[in-house]
Image (cartoon, helix red, strand yellow):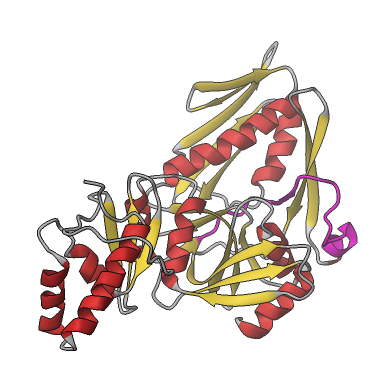
Amino acid sequence: MWQRTFSVGNISVRVKSDQQHCSNDIQAITSLFPDSANRPSLLFSIRQNRIITLSVNNEELWRSDNPGEITAAFEVHFYSRIVQKLVPKLASIHAASIGIDNQACIFAGISDAGKSSMCTKAVLEGSHYLSDEFSLLNETGEIEPFPRPLQWGKEQHPAFTHEMMAQSGIKQASFQFPDTEGNTISSLLWLPEKIQHAPLPLRWVIFPRFDASVSTSELTTIRRGEALMELPQHLHQQQRADIMLQMLNQRIPKNVTFHRIRFSNAHEAWELLKDTLF
Amino acid sequence: MTESLNLSAPEQPIKRPTLVGEELEGMDEVVYVDTENGTNVSLNVLGATILELCDGDHTIDSITDLILETLPGDREQVKKDVHHMLIEFTAYGLFTQE
């Protein structure tokens, strides 16, 4: 039986598994979260009998004879249950976040906007890693770490080679799971070395937009009001529009600046951000 | 906000009750969000003041008079500006249809 207790934001989570394959995968998925000695508020359990079952706090979530399917189900429920627990104390923004000079920068946007590309480039350049997907904004305007591994849905990334990643000291892991048609999907995980474990004050909000037609990266500064009108759509937990707007306006510090960057080359875009903002 | 002069403003406009404003302190800006449909619009403080006066009791003349109490200026010009803004608000669907 493998088990581990760790913290995410202000909660403690324990995972127990007696299924070897699942244990290995979940160890990788959860490896960047710091250990916790607190009593867990979420207990995920994976048990192998004739069939493998996944449960949380004794509520059965999934059953299958395929360990990969259980790991995939774990991943989905793990993130959604944690976000449910963290909200409203922490607002979870669909954004990647990094730490630069003890301040946080978030890249917010829809899928494929380029959040993870900017985050990966920042990490390769030595920034501290907070999250590639869940940026947790607390009540005092800080971003709390949610260091799940950087995740690629495909074996290759157009902007980063495996050699680049390996040379920077980022460790690699992966897990396989079946899709709805039974094909095996591989999810590649990258485990950055410089993990930020303490919250950092939010300083920059950037809306990236990958655009293959752009020859040179374009960075523009936008008004706080414009950003506040856009950010609610990137919250994981949707509420009434005015409540989200008010919450974000109260929490986001007054010295935060807001920007858009359109880019086709993540390396060049990062240089522009570094020269202009950081 | 853009030009939209083909519309006319209601005589005694009423702000949609589902519009909720959030003032961005120190930035001369109020962001309004419609809790019914999620649409939003950003106004400067003067624009927000005019919108808040659209309660069904005030006319363009009474709104102009109230504005002039705090921001002295040429009455005809202020009235023209208020009228223009009410047309913009109409175009953005900030008033009830009644």
Residue at x 78% of width, y 60% of height: A170
Residue A272 vs A10, above or below: the answer is: below
Residue A151 vs A40, above or below: the answer is: below
Residue at x 32% of width, y 74% of height: B44
Residue B32 location (% of width, % of height): 33, 60
Q: Quadrant of residue B78?
A: bottom left
Q: Residue furthest top?
A: A50
Residue A12 location (% of width, % of height): 48, 44
Residue A92 location (% of width, % of height): 48, 52
Residue at x 40% of width, y 53% of height: B39
Q: Tell whether A155 sits left or right of B54.
A: right
Q: Quadrant of residue A69?
A: top right
Q: Tell whether B60 sits left or right of B1.
A: left
Q: Nearer the viewer, residue B20 or B5?
A: B5
Q: Is residue A9 visible?
A: no
Judge whether residue A58 is colored magenta: no
Q: Residue furthest bottom?
A: B73
How many numbered tags mark residues here? 0
Q: Where does the magenta region start and end?
A: A144-166
Judge whether residue A157 is colored magenta: yes
